[in-house]
Image (cartoon, rainbow, N blue to C red):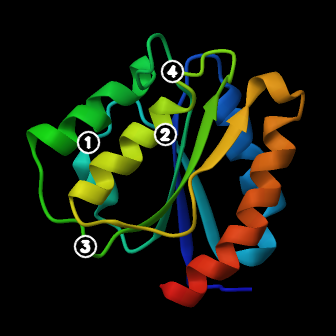
Amino acid sequence: MQNNRKLKILVGTMTNTAEYVAQAIEMDCEDLVGTIEVHLMDGLDISAFDEDALYVICTSTYGAGDVPDNAKALYESLALAPRFLGSVRYGVIALGDSAYPQTFCNGGQRFDERLSDLGAVRIGDVFKHDASAGTEPEAEGVAWCRNWLPLAWATH
């Protein structure tokens, strides 16, 4: 166990699915990290990345490929108040539905692009969960995180 390490999961959601994924990770991955904090993105801005922590953006896609309503302030602050985020290491869990191929998992991909533009370093690939696949997003998210955390610690 990495007692002194923190994982901060920032959740963008409309129907609570992303929140359920984050909560499942919080419960099932606690043996891999000292502290896991889950924060809904409501009211957050770029200062959410000020802590010395690993970050996971866990977000759904809404409407025509947008970030969820509760994630808009954080997403927009990354463009309106940009600053270098080179010390930030993060992963992305993007939830979407391949029935909408033009916008599949765009919410997570948009955060990834904006964070990357500010110098933050993504660890591993963006994990894309497909609602049409018939798999449980919570189980898939936990499995991804259990594989991702050792890789993230090795590069942190």
**Label for residue 111?**
none
Residue 35 location, x and y as percent? 62, 69
For the question of whether residue 47 can be seen, the reply is: yes
Task: Tell which of 65 and 149 is nearer to you.
Answer: 65
CA neighbours of label 3 inside 10 A, class few (<14), some (14 to 19), many (20+): few
**Residue on which disc 2 sits:** 108
Q: Quadrant of residue 104?
A: top right
Q: Earlier in the sequence, mark 1 or mark 4?
A: 1
**Residue on which disc 4 sits:** 102
Q: Earlier in the sequence, mark 3 or mark 4?
A: 3
Which amino acid is tagged 2? Answer: Gly
Q: Earlier in the sequence, mark 1 or mark 2?
A: 1
Which amino acid is tagged 4? Answer: Gln
Q: Earlier in the sequence, mark 3 or mark 1?
A: 1
CA neighbours of label 4 inside 10 A, class few (<14), some (14 to 19), many (20+): few
Residue 30 location, x and y as percent? 76, 67
Taking the image as shown, residue 119 lies to the left or right of residue 131, namely left
Which amino acid is tagged 1? Answer: Asp
**Residue on which disc 3 sits:** 86
Residue 77 location, x and y as percent? 19, 38
**Label for residue 45?**
1
Quarter of the figure with the N terminus: bottom right
